[in-house]
Image (spheres, rainbow, N blue to C red):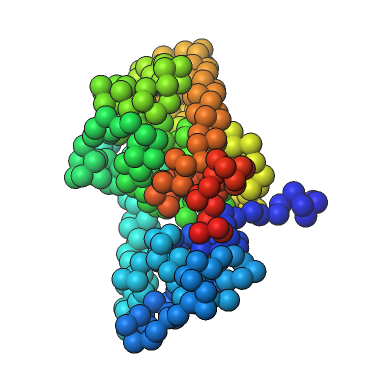
Amino acid sequence: MNNSSTTRSFNPCLVCGDKSIGFNFGVLSCMACKAFFRRNAVRLGTYDFTCPKDGDCSITHTFRRICNCCRLAKCFRVGMRKDLILSEAEKEARRKTVAKNRQKREQVLKTQCLDMVPVSTIQYFTPHQLTYLSQSDRILLGNVFNTYETTCIAARNSHLPEFPTKKHTNLYDFLNEYSLMHKVLIDYFKVIPEFNTLAIDDKICLIRNQFGVVNNINEAIVHPGISNNLIVSSSNVYGTYITNRLIKSIQRIAPFTNDPIILKLLLLVVAFSSGNCRNRNDTEMDQICNDTLSIYFAQNIYTELLWKYVLSRSSTEIDAVKFFDKLVQFLLYLLDVHLLIDGYINGLYFEIEQMEPLMQSMWPKPIKRDSSLMSGMDVESD
């Protein structure tokens, strides 16, 4: 395989513009700026940071070591949080907690795989359904259903009763509010064994590449229907044409919400699509997953399970084929809608800059195109 085809690209560090390694102290940053902030943020008040110039040094990958004063100031300006720096004792306590929680999760998953889920959790399986669904299929269906209920549905019931909660007038507020539900969806994916065993880069790749489609499907399950807040917010943010397409996609998905499991399975089928389902017109985030074979196997598991489940719910195989055809048609329509939305958001550089880190990471870092248009918005010129 050509090495260039699997070269991974990363969002730039918000402090110096170098390649980031992930979120550190609340902000996308590189290893150097992460270490710099950890060392120096705790010294505030006990050490005088002075700038050799007038406090306006350019902090870039090349010149980031020139002025610690301006570099630390920029760390705070882009959102790094001193309160997230852990002491050695806190780090050790956290490591123990993480290890303990991992053991608990592994035990729960083992129990779920060994114990048959009560049939009343989903529905009563008729003899006709048992023709298509083996015992392992029924266990897996129960696990998917219960895991989703204890993550996404539980979060909705406790603190996310509706979306949006108000009529938004700009994109970043609209998506920032949704970031809470998106975090819960990511937590759900982490509990899926086939997803949890993937390398972190492949997990990030899947979450980014299927962002719009999986969130639309998830919203149909968690917040079914079309609220007035959604119509007004979407119209304000996307305009009439995109809003009409988006509303139509919600209307087309509505019939599938009557079944307790179909959309939950479809969500996993889409989530394990290794191809890029986004329209971002860039190479920065056009990532190719490394372990495509494992991803393909995982998708095949849930695609086959979805097909078997549809067969078990249909009177005849012809009815099952017709239903599956409608499901695929809906999915293609939904993909087209989100390609349209991506194309619209790509050019909204200021809006992307105002998004919370998680939402901002779903799009490439805005590039300074024109000094007169982007004055004051380029990170490296801060």
Q: Residue furthest left?
A: 158
Question: At 38% from the left edge and 58% from the top edge, which residue is drawn?
Answer: 110
Residue 27 placement (x, y as % from top left)? 44, 60
User: Relative to 227, does residue 143 appear above or below in the rendering?
Assistant: below
Looking at the picture, tell me which residue is in the foreground, 117 or 303: 303
Residue 270 visible at all: no
- Left or right, 318 with respect to 228, comes to right
Question: At 51% from the left edge and 41% from the top edge, which residue is drawn?
Answer: 349
- Left or right, 180 with respect to 362, comes to left
Question: At 64% from the left edge and 41% from the top edge, which residue is drawn?
Answer: 282
Residue 283 placement (x, y as % from top left)? 67, 44
User: Relative to 322, does residue 224 appear above or below in the rendering?
Assistant: below
User: Relative to 366, does residue 67 appear above or below in the rendering?
Assistant: below
Q: Residue furthest bottom?
A: 46
- Left or right, 53 with respect to 174, comes to right
Residue 304 placement (x, y as % from top left)? 52, 33
